[in-house]
Amino acid sequence: MLDKIKSLPVKLAFSIGLTLILASGLLLFLFSSLFSIDTWIIMIVQGVIFAVAMLFILSAADKRHS
């Protein structure tokens, strides 16, 4: 999976990571207000999404500085 992330262009990888961070909070807020989802489940899902988004952003930063 990391090879596929590294093969993306810098701007695309950065924009995907930033979009994941910004959109996931809004979507999880809407899902929690529409459905009765426990707070801990939302926090775990948000943590996984942030980890994947950080992979995209760090990959773009590594390509740009090397």
Image: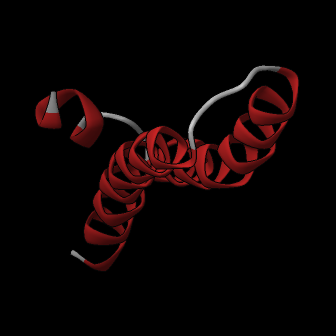
* Residue placed most toward the observer, 9 or 38: 38
Which residue in the rendered view is the most extreme toward the bottom?
65
Q: Quadrant of residue 49?
A: top left
**Quadrant the C terminus occupies:** bottom left
Asked whether 31 or 14 is in front, the reply is: 31
Q: Is residue 64 left or right of residue 10?
A: left
Q: Quadrant of residue 6?
A: top left
User: Whole-percent x and y of residue 5?
Assistant: 28, 36
User: What's the coloring here?
Assistant: secondary structure
User: Where does the image place residue 50, in percent across and percent down from the top left?
Assistant: 44, 54
Q: Residue at x 42, y 60 (%)?
A: 57
Q: In this rendering, is residue 12 above or below 22?
A: above
Q: Is residue 33 left or right of residue 40?
A: right
**Image-based side of 15 in relation to 2, left or right:** right
| Left or right: 50, with 63 as reference point | right
> Which residue appears at 49% of the width and 48% of the height?
46
In the rendered image, the residue lying farthest to the top is: 35
Residue 40 pos. (x, y %)? 46, 48
- Quarter holding the N terminus is top left
Residue at 76 percent across and 27 percent down: it is 31
